[in-house]
Image (cartoon, grey):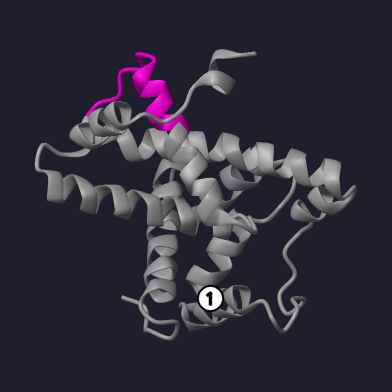
Amino acid sequence: MSRAARWTLEPESLGRFLLLLDADVAEAGRKYEQLRQRLIRLLEWRGCNDAAALADRVINRVVRRIDEGATVSPDRVAGFAVGVARLVHFEYLRERKREEPGVADTERAPFVRGTYSTTDLRLRELEDSLDRLDPDDRELVLRYHAPGRDRIARRRAIADELSTTTGALRVRVHRIRQRLERMLETGRGGEPA
């Protein structure tokens, strides 16, 4: 049996993790819940059915890694947790593929606007938010994140078209995505900031 399989979350380990988040107990609890909600949203965004349970799994792994001696500075805990969430998401896809052959393949299918089930409210909200963006920004973010193998070459070509660097392009797209996320978080219908 592996060390990871034998490890269980102990109150002392959780206490050390919370202390890493903040010395003040109340503030550490608030930061813990913020991190958990962020992980849930990330895993939902990636299409995980039970995002809350997976977020708890991510936090348990982060606590275990810190308990085993991983050095994570307080300002890097969220980034570390997002990296662990990425790995948990891959495991989730592998598990689903084993349970339902062909399901994980649909996860990689290209996004086609308007081709969602009517019960998929989150995707509809994303499309509505995309529609509220400036047309140039909408086109840019969709081209930047378009599926395909030549992602790097495509992004270099976009940067060349805009007479900018790939780094500046990445920052611009990141800001557009932040506006989209704010629109989605501010009550499904808020105007872009």
Q: What residue is drawn where x is 75% and y is 41%? A: 95
Q: In the displayed structure, does residue 34 sit left or right of residue 127?
A: left
Is residue 100 covered in magenta? no
Q: Residues within 10 Å of mark 1 (few under 14, many from 20)?
A: many
Q: What residue is drawn where x is 61% and y is 79%? A: 121
Quadrant of the rendered image containing residue 173:
bottom left
* Relative height, residue 149 to residue 176 (above, below): above
Q: Name the residue under label 1.
A: 130
Is residue 161 visible to us here? no
| Furthest residue toward right | 101
Residue bounds of the magenta highlight: 61-73
Give the mark count: 1
Q: Nearer the viewer, residue 182 or 59?
A: 59
Is residue 63 covered in magenta? yes
Is the C terminus in the top left, top right, bottom left or bottom right quadrant?
bottom left
Q: Position of residue 109 (x, y in %)?
A: 79, 56
Q: What residue is drawn where x is 42% and y is 39%? A: 59
Q: Nearer the viewer, residue 53 or 76?
A: 53
| Furthest residue toward left | 24
Is the N terminus in the top left, top right, bottom left or bottom right quadrant?
top right
* Relative height, residue 103 to residue 139 (above, below): above
Amino acid beneath label 1: Leu
Q: Where is residue 36 in the image (x, y as percent from the top left)?
A: 39, 51
